[in-house]
Image (cartoon, grey):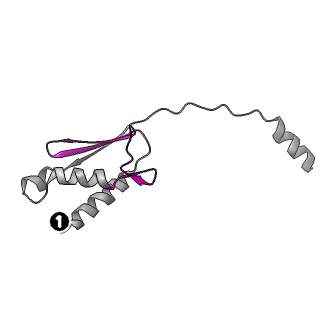
């Protein structure tokens, strides 16, 4: 019984490797309302994200895989590698707590 099982597994054709599509993840953080109320600085938040986002377990390791852009009151994070929205939300809440803005 076991001999036929091993023979069967050896006969199975090898699976072809499929090309993965490069998907680009894009996350937007709209800071318009806090900035208009004068309680938050977008440039400071962008700097915070640059310092804190980890790629491959290391900070300041963006390379060409990740970029952070700022247009007026919006921050856009563009990633060519897997990047979770939850991680971005975590860092945003951490920034708000650090600057005592979490109550707003």
Q: Is residue 67 above or below residue 56?
A: above
In which image quadrant can residue 101 be found? bottom left
- Report the residue at 25% width, 55% height from top: 48
In the rendered image, which residue does mark 1 sit on?
Answer: 101
The x and y percentages for residue 82 are 44, 45
Q: Is residue 66 found left or right of 31 in the rendered image?
A: right
**58 inside magenta stretch:** yes
Q: Is residue 20 above or below residue 101?
A: above
**72 inside magenta stretch:** yes
- Report the residue at 28% width, 63% height from top: 94
Q: Nearer the viewer, residue 64 or 15?
A: 64
Q: Residue furthest left?
A: 37
The x and y percentages for residue 67 are 32, 41
Q: Is residue 24 found left or right of 48 in the rendered image?
A: right
Q: Nearer the viewer, residue 2 or 87?
A: 87
Neighbor class of circle 1 (other Cα within 10 Å; few <14, some 14-19, many 20+) is some
In which image quadrant can residue 103 be found? bottom left
The x and y percentages for residue 72 are 14, 42
Q: Which residues are magenta?
A: 52-80
Q: Quadrant of the C terminus?
A: bottom left
Q: Is residue 44 found left or right of 24 in the rendered image?
A: left
Picture mark count: 1
The x and y percentages for residue 53 are 35, 53
Badge 1 marks a residue whose secondary structure is loop
- Report the residue at 56% width, 30% height from top: 19
């Amino acid at each position: 019984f076991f001999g036929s099982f091993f023979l069967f597994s050896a006969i199975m054709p090898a699976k072809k490797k499929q090309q993965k599509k490069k998907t680009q993840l894009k996350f937007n953080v709209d800071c318009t309302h806090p900035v208009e109320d004068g309680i938050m600085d977008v440039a400071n938040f962008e700097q915070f994200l640059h310092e804190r986002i980890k790629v491959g377990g290391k900070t300041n390791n963006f390379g060409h895989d990740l970029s952070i852009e700022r247009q007026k009151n919006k921050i856009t994070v563009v990633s060519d590698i897997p990047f979770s929205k939850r991680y971005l939300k975590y860092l945003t809440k951490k920034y708000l707590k650090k600057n005592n803005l979490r109550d707003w």
